[in-house]
Image: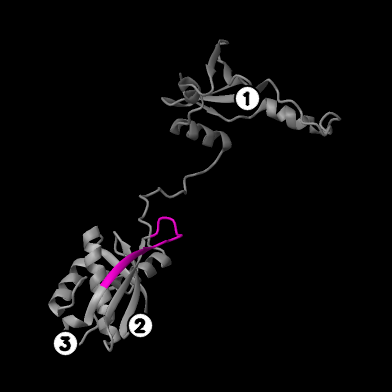
């Protein structure tokens, strides 16, 4: 079957629009849809672009049947959603040329469409990339002369926290116990090392520090540090990498438990 360009001149649709001014059209009740819609089909042959034949057709609004009156007087019948029906209303380059000639459009000045250029990053994407480039690994904030005292570290415990955000990273709190008089940097380093050891046992490569609270109880220092654990490198200016942190803890002599 030759491809056809359905202009849908809509003889039936025009009749409906023409009837909007009569008394029936002013009835507030919805009008029943017509059983058939008359259309005009412009036929053209891809092998002969100059050949244009206007045929009459009818589309059944109930069954989706298309009845096309061919130039030789025969009737072509097909389903609108069938392969033949889609082919009947297919648009080819020859069809477009025929329509262009029919509408007397001059497209000679239109530039040729080149390949689509790659989309440039948005301002937000640039800002996120710049922020990610500033991310540094989290280090233990200890002086070079630091020497660990094993008796300062009295044990640590990791507890999972409830997170209301769906799909968010794991949220945990490290409760570390230290001897009284230990400075804040040493206490935080102990909590970080305990977390790194726990994260390695869970196979989690990254963590990000959220907050740390400290208190004194019974002559001891109690530290509560909250972290997020994630499988992928999170956003943040300082990100803990489990393996690197464990290596630093070992080199500084801070227990990871």
Instruction: Residue at the far left: name it.
Output: 251
Q: Is residue 197 above or below residue 20?
A: below
Of residue 131 and residue 88, the one placed in the foreground of this image is: 131
Kind of element beneath mark 3? loop
Kind of element beneath mark 2? strand
Q: How far apart are marks 2 and 1 (CA)?
A: 89 Å
Q: Which colour scheme is used?
A: one colour
Residue 217: which numbered mark, if any?
2
Is residue 254 shown left or right of residue 188? Answer: left
- The residue mark sitting in front, 1 or 3, is 3
Residue 39: which numbered mark, if any?
1
Of residue 51 and residue 61, the one placed in the foreground of this image is: 61
Of residue 226 and residue 205, the one placed in the foreground of this image is: 226
**Residue at x 21%, y 82% (from the top left corner):** 152
Q: Name the residue under label 3.
A: 144
Is residue 170 shown left or right of residue 153? Answer: right
Q: Is residue 137 visible?
A: no
Residue 199, percent from left and from top: 25, 63
Residue 246, percent from left and from top: 18, 70
Residue 142 occupies quadrant: bottom left
Say which label, 2 or 3, has the lower sequence index: 3
Q: Can residue 153 be seen in this view?
A: yes
Say which label, 1 or 3, has the lower sequence index: 1
Q: How far apart are marks 2 and 3 (CA)?
A: 30 Å
The quadrant of the image that shows the C terminus is bottom left
């Amino acid at each position: 079957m030759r491809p056809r360009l359905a202009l849908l001149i809509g003889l039936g649709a025009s009749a409906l629009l023409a009837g909007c001014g009569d008394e029936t059209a002013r009835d507030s009740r919805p009008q029943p849809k017509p059983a058939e819609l008359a259309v005009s089909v412009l036929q053209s042959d891809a092998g002969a672009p100059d050949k244009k034949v206007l045929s009459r057709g009818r589309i059944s609004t109930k069954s989706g049947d298309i009845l096309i009156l061919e130039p030789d007087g025969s009737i072509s019948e097909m389903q609108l959603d069938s392969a033949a029906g889609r082919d009947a209303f297919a648009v080819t380059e020859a069809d477009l040329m025929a329509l262009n000639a029919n509408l007397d459009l001059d497209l000679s000045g239109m530039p040729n469409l080149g390949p689509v250029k790659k989309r440039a990053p948005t301002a937000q994407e640039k800002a996120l990339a710049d922020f990610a480039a500033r991310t540094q690994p989290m280090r233990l904030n200890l002086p070079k002369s630091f020497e660990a005292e094993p008796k300062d570290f009295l044990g640590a415990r990791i507890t999972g926290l409830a997170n209301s955000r769906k799909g968010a990273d794991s949220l945990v709190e490290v409760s570390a116990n230290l001897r009284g008089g230990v400075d804040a940097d040493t206490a935080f380093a102990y909590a970080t090392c305990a977390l790194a050891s726990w994260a390695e046992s869970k196979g989690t490569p990254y963590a990000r520090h959220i907050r740390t609270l400290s208190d004194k109880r019974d002559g001891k220092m109690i530290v509560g540090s909250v972290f997020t654990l994630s499988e992928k490198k999170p956003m943040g200016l300082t990100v803990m990498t489990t393996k690197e942190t464990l290596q630093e803890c070992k080199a500084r002599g801070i227990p990871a438990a």
